[in-house]
Amino acid sequence: MSIPPRRPSPSAQDGPPASRRMPRRLVQLLAGLVLYGFSMGLLVRAQLGVIPWDVLHQGLAGRLGLSMGTVVIGLSLLLLLLWIPLRERPGIGTLANAVVVGLALDATLALLPPVEAMPLQVVLVVAGVALNAVATAAYIGVHLGPGPRDGLMTGLVRRTGGSVRVVRTSIEAVVVLAGWLLGGTVGLGTVLYALAIGPLVQPLMPRLSVRLDR
């Protein structure tokens, strides 16, 4: 009776679980970031108020004569410089977030014209907030690094000892005020996003988070 060859263990044959799941993680990351930019575009075209950071993006874009996507990318890169004193470490997802979201936003705005009818505007706002929640859970769930704005928040939380709620609220209040003063749009979409995004993302996270330990 011959002895069958010894089969390599799963870890030796396929690599660590995180490595085996990398293709799925990269696909989900890209899809999540594209969807994030698309959802931002829906809120812009609804003209009923944009998400807090986009109030600043929109205001800067108008003042500088640049596209919103270009401003998103430029500001993302500037925020990454603030990570240095905060000792935050970017990942693949961080760098992808800095570029892909802005490109997807500009593509959406190029394809989708502004909407004037109120019922359709409301539909775009609701769809934009809902899709943004899915996109947020998708790109966070791959564990490849936080976005530039999320990393700023977590870095400040760690350095100041403040709570996530207080730090995030403070940052978003500042960017909304600055963006509004620059001409950004604050309205129904801004308020709905601020109230709904947390409750929407929370139940989606377990469903879209990639398990790295098996």
Image (cartoon, grey):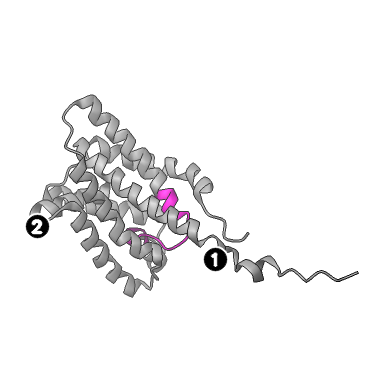
Judging depth in this view, the residue of 203 and 155 nearest the camera is 203
The nearer-to-camera label among 1 and 2 is 1
Judging depth in this view, the residue of 195 and 212 nearest the camera is 212
Q: Secondary structure at mark 1?
A: helix
Q: Is residue 47 above or below residue 110?
A: above
Q: Is residue 144 left or right of residue 117?
A: right
The residue indicated by pointer 1 is 19
Residue type, numbered disc 1: Ser
Residue type, numbered disc 2: Leu
Identify the residue shown where x is 32% and y is 41%.
193
Q: Within the image, what quadrant is residue 96 found in?
A: bottom left
The numbered disc on residue 183 is: none
Magenta segment includes 144: yes
Q: Does the CB distance between marks 1 and 2 fall below 8 Å?
A: no
- Residue 152 in view, yes or no: no
**Upstream in the sequence, badge 1 or badge 2?**
1
Where is residue 91 drawn, in percent x and y? 41, 67
Q: Quadrant of the C terminus?
A: bottom right
Where is residue 150 drawn, in percent x and y? 36, 58
Q: Secondary structure at mark 2?
A: helix
Residue range highlighted in magenta? 136-152
